[in-house]
Amino acid sequence: MRTLRFITADVFTSEPFTGNQLAVVFGAEGLPSETLQAITREFNYSETTFVSAPETPGTTRRVRIFTPGMEVPFAGHPTIGTAHVLVATGEVRPSDDERAAGELTVVLGENVGPVPVRVRLEAGVPTWAQLTTAVLPESRVEVTDRDALAHMLSLDPAELLDGAYAPCGVSCGLPFQMIPLATVAAVSRARLRVDAWEQLLGGKWAEWPMVFAMTGGRDDGELAAHVRGCDIRARVFVPSGGVPEDPATGSANAALAGYLAARTPRDGLLTWAVAQGVEMGRPSRLHIEAHKHGGVIDAVRVGGASVLMSEGTMTVR
């Protein structure tokens, strides 16, 4: 028998009971992957992380990330949330210089590689965190049938954008199918037909759909205060990962930053605020950015706040 300690947090939000739930588990070293998967299903959040001592020089902790259906090499909300939990609980303590500077960097050793997370501090307490992806954006066009994509989403084909903003698979460590829509109303109406998804995207490199639309500032009145004023409304569906819909998906939003930056003609720092999880009653706010130099994307970052929610223990055999 072994007793594990866990902390739960709501990620990509400053308000309890919103954002994306995360369980961070300590003391699971040496347990088989099947047990870690079972623990993840017990929490039944979109992801659970398992934290252990660093295995690679230059990293702060080793972190494995599981959805209810599988282990994934990288994910944004578990990365942001785990870094926040480590600092908030004193597992990782800022130096005097870091306290004075108001930030420290936690480097998490994930299956995708080392992922640095910059954590902002106020009086030594974490308030916000931002990851830099270990992998720069990679794109693939696998599906061009707009009628089939629209049917999969229960939408009219005219509601999908085309041309430069046609659907495209993008990955910054975890691939997603970017599907730009014409309106926020279309984003809200989208309903994933799983049978159609299996036929069209199941087994593809980028099989998980992300639908999004630019808001134009027109939807603020219907939103919770902490997600008003966002540039983009988005939704993400991860059916083969055991997550029918995800309230906040850092890895997909990293891919979105890459997708948008590749279609923006200017260099420099490009930033957007994204509201996700609204239709689920878990409104989340994500800050995404990409940096371009000479027309080439050389960095992608995702940031947001987190709130600690609970702690406890679990006994496993």
Image (spheres, rainbow, N blue to C red):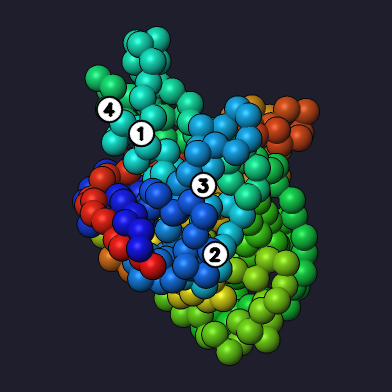
Q: Nearer the viewer, mark 2 or mark 4?
A: 2
Q: Whole-Å distance between the Cαs marked 4 and 1?
A: 13 Å
Q: Amino acid at mark 1?
A: Glu
- Secondary element type, mark 2: helix
Q: Whole-Å distance between the Cαs marked 3 and 2?
A: 13 Å
Instruction: Tell whether label 4 touches label 2 (CB within 8 Å).
Output: no
Q: Quadrant of the C terminus?
A: bottom left
Q: Residues within 10 Å of mark 3 (few under 14, many from 20)?
A: many
Q: Which mark is residue 33?
A: 2
- Secondary element type, mark 4: strand
Q: Amino acid at mark 4?
A: Val
Q: Which residue is mark 3?
A: 63
Q: Residues within 10 Å of mark 1 (few under 14, many from 20)?
A: few
Q: Which residue is mark 1?
A: 91
Q: Whole-Å distance between the Cαs marked 4 and 3?
A: 22 Å
Q: Nearer the viewer, mark 4 or mark 1?
A: 1
Q: Which residue is mark 4?
A: 125
**Residue 199 at x, y percent in the picture:** 68, 86
Q: Whole-Å distance between the Cαs marked 1 and 2?
A: 24 Å
Query: Which of the marked residues, 1 or 2, is nearer the chain's N terminus?
Result: 2
Query: Which of the marked residues, 4 or 3, is nearer the chain's N terminus?
Result: 3
- Secondary element type, mark 1: loop
Q: Quadrant of the N terminus?
A: bottom left
Relative to residue 35, is residue 14 depicted above or below?
above
